[in-house]
Image (spheres, rainbow, N blue to C red):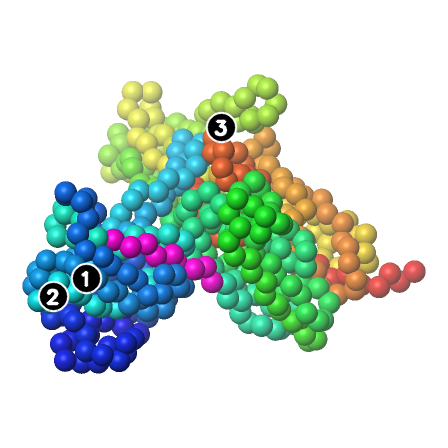
């Protein structure tokens, strides 16, 4: 599908069946499938113009709202004749504000992109069409400008869409939920999922230009199950949206049919660790191999340029404490041992990854006078369920290591059969988090998912704290973190 089309002089405009009024071709970016074309692919970023002496001309967009992938017909009149104009799409660029262990919300920088350059005809008219990009939902401005001068503009709303695939499958089938057109303003930017009238979690789209994609397991007995996508600025879904101050916000209902057949089970726990997390750039003269690991995994600390034959102390930095007990938390340093530099001044210390909090840990090698520094990153990991089969009421445990300490990494939320049942924190216990659960439901497979979440922050709206972030993989505000998925088989009680 072409992302921008200008009807050349003499051709037929399919929208009106009459000759178009564009006399110059546009120069769009190369055509891409709509799903791969965000607004940033239109063309170079430009500064939105401002009217100088008032607006000139009039532009209309048909339709006035549509989802990504639809075609917008642009018609303008009353412009100076035979002059070039930039057709500009305005939007925002989102980013999370999270630094030094604290979460401070999200922010959006206004940006604009040139869709194409058009030339008015001898009457001062322009007509063209382009494809709605994959972008933040709700209102955008479409501008016609020359350099810094804005001549005219019109508003366009990007509609939200929700797709669920597949439509059916046995228990445990990964259901992909694909949402486009999530907004960035209050009452537009916090969308929540319910599964069979049970709260599952929320979906974000801050750094993904209004798009959210995530998977949940098919849960429940064979038959139809209902997924609802609703808005909620204050943690949970707002049920009577039609009577709210913004009554035209959409509500979505989709169905999934659980079929009979062998369950689709999650991979073993040790295969659910992130394979290639995004880490901060490495600094310092120490190198760790690998650059990241899970608790207990073999680790090598290496450095060069040391004094041959000299013994060095190796220290590891962490934090200890909590945010709720009154005594706070503090940075601490612990010894990892000693090692001697070889004849070439090289130093190697082999050990197991310390049982500690997830995230970055500063490492220092020192002789009291000279210090070499580096860092190592611990990733969260999970052990298998201690019990994975039994009658309803069976107690079982989920055990995590390497849970972080920052406001974006110190908790994991627990979801049972797509119903949120609570969270646990790993800060006070140095990254060790143990969850005790009780199997429930009819005989068959039941699915337990642990999602990262934002523990707290200074943000007042929307309130997305301490609830599962379903879009953790693409849009988490802090560290790259995994989710963990488990399955428990409820069986008939032998008694």
Image position, residue 295 (x, y; %): 52, 43
Image position, residue 23 (x, y; %): 11, 71
Question: Circles 3 and 2: CB distance less than 8 Å?
Answer: no
Label 2: how many residues lie within 10 Å, few (<14), some (14-19) or many (20+)? few
**Quarter of the image where the N terminus is located:** bottom left
Instruction: Please name the residue that numbered disc 2 is placed on.
Output: 123
Q: CA distance from mark 3 to mark 1?
A: 64 Å
Q: Which residue is located at x 61 percent, y 23 percent?
A: 325
Q: In the image, 3: left or right of 377?
A: left
Instruction: Point out the tag, 2 or 1, that comes first from the N-terminus.
Output: 1
Q: Which residue is located at x 62 percent, y 73 percent?
A: 169
Disc 1 secondary structure class? strand
Most foreground residue, 241 or 69? 241
Instruction: Please name the residue that numbered disc 3 is placed on.
Output: 319
> Where on the picture, by quarter, is residue 466?
top right
Image position, residue 224 (x, y; %): 68, 69
Most foreground residue, 143 or 486? 143
**Is label 3 or label 1 in front?**
1
Disc 3 secondary structure class? strand
- Magenta stretch: residue 158 in it? yes
Instruction: Point out the tag, 3 or 1, that comes first from the N-terminus.
Output: 1
250 above or below 294?
below
Most foreground residue, 157 or 95? 157
The residues colored magenta run: 153-161
Residue 299 appearing in the image:
no
**Quarter of the image where the C terminus is located:** bottom right
Q: Which residue is located at x 59 percent, y 30 percent?
A: 428
The majority secondary structure of the magenta stretch comes to strand
């Amino acid at each position: 599908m072409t992302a921008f089309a200008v009807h050349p002089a003499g051709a037929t405009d399919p929208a009106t069946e009459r000759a178009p009024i564009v006399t110059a071709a546009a120069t769009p970016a190369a055509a891409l499938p709509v799903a791969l074309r965000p607004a940033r692919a239109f063309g170079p970023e430009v500064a939105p113009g401002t009217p100088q002496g008032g607006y000139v001309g009039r532009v209309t967009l048909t339709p006035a709202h549509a989802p990504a992938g639809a075609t917008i017909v642009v018609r303008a009149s009353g412009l100076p004749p035979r002059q070039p104009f930039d057709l500009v799409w305005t939007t925002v660029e989102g980013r999370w504000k999270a630094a030094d262990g604290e979460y401070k919300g999200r922010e959006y920088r206004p940006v604009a992109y040139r869709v194409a350059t058009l030339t008015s005809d001898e009457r001062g008219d322009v007509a063209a069409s382009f494809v709605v990009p994959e972008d933040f939902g709700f209102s955008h401005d479409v501008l016609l400008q020359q350099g810094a001068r804005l001549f005219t503009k019109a508003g366009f709303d990007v509609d939200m869409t929700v797709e669920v695939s597949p439509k059916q499958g046995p228990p445990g089938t990964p259901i992909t939920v694909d949402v486009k057109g999530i907004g960035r303003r209050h009452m537009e930017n916090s969308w929540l999922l319910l599964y069979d009238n049970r709260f599952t979690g929320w979906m974000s789209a801050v750094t993904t230009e209004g798009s959210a994609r995530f998977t949940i397991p098919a849960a429940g007995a064979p038959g139809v199950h209902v997924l609802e996508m609703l808005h909620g600025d204050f943690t949970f879904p707002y049920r009577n949206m039609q009577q709210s101050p913004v009554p035209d916000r959409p509500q979505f209902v989709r169905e999934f049919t659980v079929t009979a057949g062998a369950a689709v089970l999650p991979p073993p726990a040790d295969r659910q660790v992130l394979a290639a997390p995004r880490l901060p750039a490495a600094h310092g003269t120490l190198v760790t191999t690998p650059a990241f690991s899970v608790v207990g995994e073999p680790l090598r600390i290496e450095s060069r340029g040391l004094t041959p034959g000299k013994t060095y102390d190796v220290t590891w930095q962490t934090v200890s404490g909590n945010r709720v007990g009154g005594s706070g938390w503090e940075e601490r340093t612990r010894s990892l041992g000693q090692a001697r530099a070889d004849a070439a001044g090289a130093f190697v210390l082999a050990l197991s990854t310390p049982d500690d909090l997830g995230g970055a840990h500063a490492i220092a090698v020192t002789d009291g006078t000279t210090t070499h520094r580096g860092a190592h990153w611990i990733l969260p990991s999970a052990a298998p369920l201690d019990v994975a089969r039994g009658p309803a009421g069976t107690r079982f445990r989920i055990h995590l290591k390497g849970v972080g300490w920052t406001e974006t990494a110190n908790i994991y939320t627990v979801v049972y059969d797509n119903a949120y049942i609570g969270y646990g924190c790993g800060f006070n216990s140095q990254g060790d988090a143990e969850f005790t659960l009780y199997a429930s439901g009819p005989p068959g497979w039941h699915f337990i998912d642990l999602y990262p979440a934002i523990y707290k922050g200074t943000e007042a709206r929307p309130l997305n704290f301490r609830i599962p972030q379903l879009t953790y993989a693409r849009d988490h505000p802090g560290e790259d973190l995994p989710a963990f998925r488990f399955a428990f088989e409820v069986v008939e009680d032998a008694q």
